[in-house]
C-alpha cells in the first residue's frame, strides 16, 4: 500500500508540469515575450503540435523568429532570435527529431559548418532566452511573472584572443565568450537577478 501511494504521488507530481502544448494563440503570446517589445507583433513564431513536432504558427514580417515552449518539462523556456539563425536552428530541430544527443548535434553542425554545408547566422546575430518557474506560469491565459531573460550574441569561430572576452563572467551581468573557436561561439550575457 505504501509503495502504491508513493508511486501515485510521483505520477501526480509529474503530471503537474507534463501538460500538452497550449493552443496556438497561447504559444504565440508566450513565445514573443523573449523578443524586444517593438518586434513582437511582426515576429515569425514556431511552436509545437500535439505530437511535439515543431510547426510554423505564424509567418512574420520582420527579422525576428520566436520559438514557443516545449511542453514536456517544467517551467517556461522560450526564445527569439535573428532570422539569419533559422537554418542553424532548423538543423538542430531535425537532428533532435532523429534522436541525436546534444553532443552529437554539436559535432554534426560543427562539421557541416566547416564544410560549408550549414549556413550560420550573421556575425553578431542576437538570441534572447526567457524562462520562468512552473509556479509563475499560467498555461491557460499565457500570463507569466518573475521571468528572467539572458542574451546570446553569435560570433562564429571567435575566440577569447580575437575578441578580448573572458572565458567566464568577470562579475554579475558581465559578458563572456562561450564555445570559443567553434561554429557556436557566442557572447553570453546573464543579467544579475534581482
Image (tube, rainbow, N blue to C red):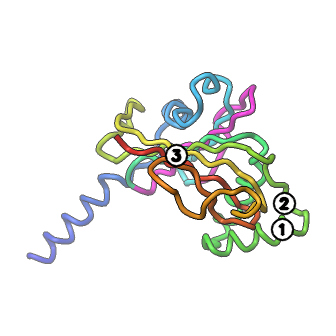
Q: Quadrant of the N terminus?
A: bottom left
Q: Quadrant of residue 146?
A: top left
Give the x, y percent position of residue 73.
42, 56
Q: Which numbered disc, 1 or 3, marks the residue that appears first in the sequence?
A: 1
**Span of residues in magenta:** 53-73
| Residue at mark 1 | 112
Res 118 label: 2
Give the x, y percent position of residue 6.
16, 71
Q: Quadrant of residue 147?
A: top left
How far separated are the C-alphas under marks 1 and 3? 27 Å
Q: Is residue 57 magenta?
A: yes
Give the x, y percent position of residue 172.
44, 50
Q: Quadrant of the C terminus?
A: top left
Circle 1/circle 2 CB separation < 8 Å: yes
Quick check: 78 above or below 33? Answer: below
Specify few, some or many for label 1: CA neighbours under 10 Å numbering under 14, 14-19, or 20 or more.
Answer: some
Please report the residue visible at 89 percent of the width from the left and 63 percent of the height from the top: 117
* Closest to the observer, 117 or 3: 117
In this image, 123 relative to 20: left or right? right
Give the x, y percent position of residue 24.
55, 34
SS class, disc 1: helix
Specify few, some or many for label 2: CA neighbours under 10 Å numbering under 14, 14-19, or 20 or more.
Answer: some
In this image, 161 relative to 2: left or right? right
| Residue at mark 3 | 150
Amino acid at each position: 500500500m505504501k509503495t502504491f501511494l508513493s508511486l501515485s504521488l510521483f505520477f501526480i507530481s509529474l503530471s503537474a508540469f507534463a501538460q500538452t502544448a497550449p493552443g496556438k494563440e497561447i504559444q504565440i503570446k508566450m513565445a514573443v515575450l523573449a523578443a524586444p517589445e517593438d518586434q513582437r507583433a511582426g515576429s515569425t513564431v514556431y511552436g509545437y503540435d500535439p505530437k511535439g513536432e515543431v510547426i510554423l504558427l505564424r509567418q512574420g514580417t520582420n527579422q525576428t523568429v520566436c520559438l514557443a515552449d516545449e511542453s514536456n518539462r517544467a517551467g517556461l523556456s522560450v526564445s527569439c532570435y535573428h532570422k539569419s539563425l533559422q537554418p542553424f536552428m532548423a538543423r538542430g530541430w531535425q537532428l533532435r527529431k532523429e534522436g541525436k544527443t546534444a553532443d552529437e548535434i554539436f559535432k554534426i553542425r560543427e562539421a557541416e559548418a566547416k564544410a560549408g554545408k550549414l549556413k550560420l547566422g550573421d556575425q553578431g546575430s542576437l538570441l534572447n532566452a526567457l524562462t520562468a518557474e512552473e509556479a509563475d506560469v499560467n498555461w491557460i491565459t499565457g500570463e507569466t511573472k518573475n521571468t528572467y531573460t539572458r542574451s546570446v550574441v553569435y560570433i562564429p569561430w571567435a575566440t577569447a584572443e580575437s575578441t578580448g572576452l573572458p572565458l567566464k563572467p568577470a562579475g554579475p551581468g558581465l559578458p563572456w565568450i562561450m564555445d570559443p573557436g567553434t561554429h557556436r561561439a557566442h557572447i553570453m550575457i546573464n543579467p544579475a537577478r534581482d
